[in-house]
Image: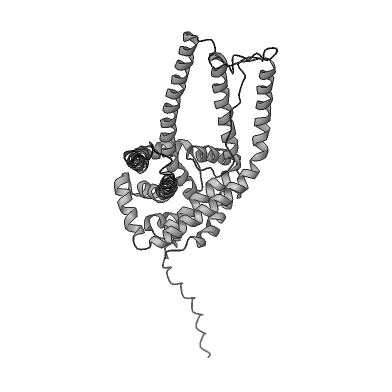
Amino acid sequence: MPVSAVDCVQPALQRTRDQLFRPFRLGQWSRLALVGFLAAELHISGCNFNGFNFPVSHPRRGNELTSTFAPFPHFDPARIAQFAALFAAIVAVAIVLFFIFLYLNSVFRFILFDSVLKKSCSISQGWSRWHRAGRRYFLWQIVLIIAEGLFLGVLLGVPLALAAALGWFRNADEHLARSVLGVICLIGLFLVFLLLAAAVQLLAKDFLVPIMALEDVDFADGWSRLMALMRPEPGKYAIYLLLKIVLTIAAAIVFGILTLIPILALVVPAALAVFAGYKAGLGWNVTTVSVAVIFGGMLMAVLVYVVALVSVPATVFFPAFSIYFFASRYPKLDALLNPPPPVSELPPVIDAPPPDSPPLPPSPEPIG
């Protein structure tokens, strides 16, 4: 019988306690942290790490401006070319890393689902089992990104093109009220777009992944079967999404506070190193930019993994929450979540031969 989203919270908490603390296994905890990081199942807030700025040179004496703030510093074509090449290399590496992470995210989404379902995490076995399904989900994520980009382009491009055709940009003072109203409408449409995109992504990772995993289908057939399951009770799924948003916000607050101390323990030494570089007179050049990018990336990776370690309970709870909700509506998942108890086989009954009748007492001798 389908259960409500609220009724799934307690079983999900119980499953999280059983998997993580009964007994506690450090190896499984660390593996789940890596799986949660690569599956993008982190629920924290306040993880915006700002960069540090180096001055190009020390201020000169008097009121003379340094080359940093001069409107047109010494133009060096060779140096500009070096920075342009470095920027292009950084952009190219970022694009490659994005698609690598997207592929890993697609596979590890299935590994996380399997780990929570079985209460056991094995990355090597999970990769060999789920990389085929992960490729299909990777294709879905690319299609989703392209569709979102096209939809957003139409959503913002068409109103801006109409405004330009009507001359609102040429005579802005005459159309100030209409421009303000148009901006408000665009912001509202953009927020609706973000909500719809977030809802699609939640439905995909919570419900499309189990269907693709258990039925070995591609994302098109998986969405078709998911829509068929959602059609009888769309309100229950809407309540599920709303409750998950509330739980995600609560988890972001709790784990954001818990991760504050380890984040400071890593960021403060890095800030001191930056300050030491500032005092030593380091300036921006190809070498310092390259070093900053490399060590900044390493620091970011360490920070994210530390956050993932702290957030392991949330990493297990949210997939468990979706599994309990969907299992009551998806029989194949329910059969794995609640297997029937094993039937104990009784030993065969062997008919024993009837016991031998005791011997009769001897007949008494006749008297006389």
Q: Is residue 100 left or right of residue 21?
A: left
- Is there any visible trace of residue 339 in the rendered image? no
Image position, residue 269 (x, y; %): 68, 27
Question: Going 68% across and 22% down the picture, which residue do you hit?
Answer: 275
Above or below for 211 versus 361: above
Q: Nearer the viewer, residue 365 or 268?
A: 268
Image position, residue 337 (x, y; %): 45, 55
Quarter location, residue 264: top right
Question: Going 47% across and 22% down the picture, which residue do you hit?
Answer: 90
Question: Going 31% across and 39% down the picture, which residue do you hit?
Answer: 165
Look at the image and name its color scheme: one colour
Single out the residue that lies furthest toward the front.
Answer: 174
> In the picture, which quadrant includes the N terminus?
bottom left
Q: Nearer the viewer, residue 89 or 159?
A: 159
Q: Nearer the viewer, residue 54 or 365?
A: 54
Above or below for 351 versus 47: below
Image position, residue 65 (x, y; %): 63, 15
Q: Is residue 134 left or right of residue 123?
A: left
Question: Going 54% across and 50% down the picture, which residue do you hit?
Answer: 248
Image position, residue 115 (x, y; %): 48, 45
Quarter location, residue 297: top right
Number of on-image labels: 0
- Is there any visible trace of residue 67 in the rendered image? yes
Q: Nearer the viewer, residue 284 or 155?
A: 155
Above or below for 297 versus 154: above
